[in-house]
């Protein structure tokens, strides 16, 4: 059976447009638009901000790409897909605000299809994945509770088990093993979603994508006018180094994109514009910077 993904195509394009418009209206930044094509098949639309007033760097990316054979990172994960033609589609975003009191955030919703070989009796294989998470530099408990509550509300129609399972999955996925800390305060993450059929799985993904603005923008509005100086910016750059470490060492999407011949500019747009590393540095006890460590371990927020 062939998997129809035209409805997903239309949804993902609309989601990208809605998110970009809300961010432009909120911050006064104008997103550039970069249409691109991939030699092996497909392409995408990258919407981005560099050196904006609210967003120091932001990327809200739509992609729909195809390939003839899966890269090693995917076929190792799902060996039954080896040798199949494939296509992947979705929206991915990373927002790096200028103000250190506004958290960095990431959201991704996607569908992957491995097409059945020609003239075979096999079916296409598909799955959805995605999630959203929050990476604060100066954390506030009420922000973390709000973010998680919106995530839980989005998943509630699909069963009481979804939020606890996807929250745990997020805590485990966005974990820097070499640092023994989470990347931020988590959120939700899921992958390989297909067991209830295409339409039910797609409905869950739409609910996750649609909740992003409700989860993130109230935090932006609450923190955007807080005053900061070079001290806070310096700490923000130091903690952004952790974000770089995770994306380059552990992130499956980054690895898949690079190994599948993806567009490097779009893949690495998730990186912060400025980041620093220091040798064996730790903040002074009792400072706001030291308080962040209390948030970088899995905990219940709602």
Image (tube, grey):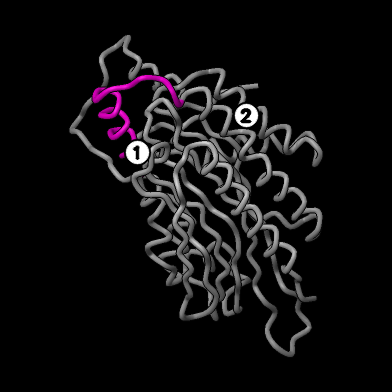
Q: In which quadrant will I find the N terminus?
A: bottom right
Q: Where residue 184 sits in the image (x, y, percent)? A: 46, 32
Residue at point 41%, 31% (across, down) = 181
Residue 153 lies, with reference to residue 226, above or below; the image says below
Furthest toward the bottom, the residue is 119
The correct choice, above or below, for 72 with respect to 98 in the image is below
Q: Is residue 11 magenta?
A: no
Residue 45 image offset from top left, x and y in percent = 52, 64
List the residue tagged with mark 1: 242
Label 2: which secondary element: helix
Where's residue 185, x and y in %? 50, 29
Residue wearing tag 2: 148
* Residue nearer the viewer, 191 or 108: 108
Q: In the rendered image, which quarter is residue 274 located in?
A: top left
Instruction: Point out the tag, 2 or 1, that comes first from the N-terminus.
Output: 2
Does the magenta stretch mainly form a helix, a strand or a loop?
helix
- In percent of width and height, residue 6 lies at 73, 69
Callout 1: helix, strand or loop? helix
* In this view, 190 is above or below 98: below
Task: Name the residue at 29% across, 35% down.
Answer: 237
Badge 1 density bin: few <14, some 14–19, many ≥20, Cα 10 Å: some
- In the image, farthest residue toward the top: 286
Measuring 58% from the left and 68% from the top, which residue is drawn there? Answer: 64
User: Which residue is at the front of the view, 58 or 248?
Assistant: 58
Magenta span of residues: 224-244
Is residue 240 inside the magenta stretch?
yes
Q: In this image, 134 relative to 81: left or right?
A: left
Res 269 → quadrant: bottom left
Q: Which quadrant does the C terminus fall into?
A: top right
Specify the quadrant of the image occupied by residue 275: top left
């Amino acid at each position: 059976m062939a998997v129809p993904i035209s409805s997903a195509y239309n949804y993902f394009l609309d989601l990208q447009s809605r998110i970009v418009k809300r961010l432009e209206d909120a911050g006064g930044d104008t997103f550039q638009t970069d249409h691109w094509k991939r030699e092996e098949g497909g392409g995408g639309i990258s919407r981005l901000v560099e050196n904006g007033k609210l967003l120091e760097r932001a990327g809200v990316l739509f992609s729909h790409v195809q390939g003839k054979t899966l890269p090693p990172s995917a076929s190792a994960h799902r060996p039954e897909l080896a040798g199949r033609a494939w296509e992947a589609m979705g929206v991915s975003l990373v927002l790096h605000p200028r103000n250190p009191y506004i958290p960095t955030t990431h959201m991704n919703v996607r569908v992957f299809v491995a097409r059945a070989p020609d003239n075979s009796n096999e079916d296409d294989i598909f799955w959805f994945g995605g999630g959203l998470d929050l990476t604060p530099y100066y954390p506030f408990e009420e922000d973390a509770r709000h973010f998680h509550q919106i995530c839980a509300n989005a998943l509630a129609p699909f069963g009481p088990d979804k939020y606890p399972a996807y929250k745990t999955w997020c805590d485990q996925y966005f974990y820097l093993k070499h640092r023994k800390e989470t990347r931020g305060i988590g959120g939700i993450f899921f992958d390989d979603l297909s067991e209830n059929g295409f339409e039910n799985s797609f409905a869950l993904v739409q609910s996750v994508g649609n909740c992003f603005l409700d989860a993130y923008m109230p935090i932006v509005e609450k923190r955007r006018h807080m005053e900061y100086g070079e001290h806070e910016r310096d700490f923000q750059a130091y903690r952004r180094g952790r974000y770089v470490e995770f994306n380059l060492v552990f992130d499956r999407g980054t690895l898949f994109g690079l190994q599948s011949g993806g567009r490097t500019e779009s893949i690495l747009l998730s990186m912060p514009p400025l980041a620093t590393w220091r040798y064996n540095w730790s903040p002074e006890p009792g400072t706001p910077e030291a308080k962040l460590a209390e948030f970088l371990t899995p905990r219940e927020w709602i």
